Image (tube, rainbow, N blue to C red):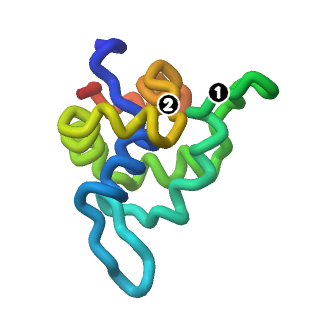
Amino acid sequence: MELMKITVMAIAMLALLASASVVRGSIQICNVSEDDLMPCMPAVTRSNVQPPVQPVQACCTVLSTANLSCFCELGNKYPSLLRMFRIDPVLARDLPGECKLNSFPGC
């Protein structure tokens, strides 16, 4: 099951490129704003300089209102985009669990 989880953030970025719609000047991705997803980025990226961090509450709050099935669908259709955004697939996969979104069964 863990292996099947897709990061909401990763999929959000995929959705941004693949099927974003503009609403009130802000791009909406799976029922959330791209701007609202930005607090999740440090939790799903790795660098040689700094280790990844735990997701902040703002990230988890946004994830709790997102259409997670939509993120799964986009992530499954466009997995190569994860690398484009330097998103670590393991960190992305684990993000809903880190936010304690127990109602999400995985992708």
Q: Name the residue under label 2.
A: 95
For disc 1, the neighbor class at 10 Å (few under 14, some 14 to 19, many from 20) is some
**Residue situated furthest bottom in the rendering:** 24
Residue 80 in the image: state x and y as whole percent: 32, 33
* Location of residue 60 with respect to 7 vertically, above or below: below
Residue occupying image coordinates x 62% and y 34% = 43
Q: Name the residue under label 1.
A: 46
What residue is drawn where x is 33% and y is 13%?
A: 3
From the image, which quarter does the N terminus lie in?
Answer: top left
Nearer-the-camera pick, 101 or 32: 32
Residue ID at (54%, 65%): 35
Side of 39 where 23 appears, left or right: left
**If you read the primary sequence from the N terminus, does the residue marked by circle 1 or circle 2 appear first?**
1
Task: Indicate left or right for 102 with 52 as reference.
Answer: left
Instruction: Give coordinates of residue 93: x percent, y percent.
Output: 42, 25
Q: Distance between the residues labelled 1 and 2?
A: 14 Å
Q: Which of the 4 quarters of the picture holds residue 77?
A: top left
Front residue of 99 and 9: 9
Q: How crowded is mark 2: few (under 14 residues within 10 Å), some or many (20 or more)?
A: many
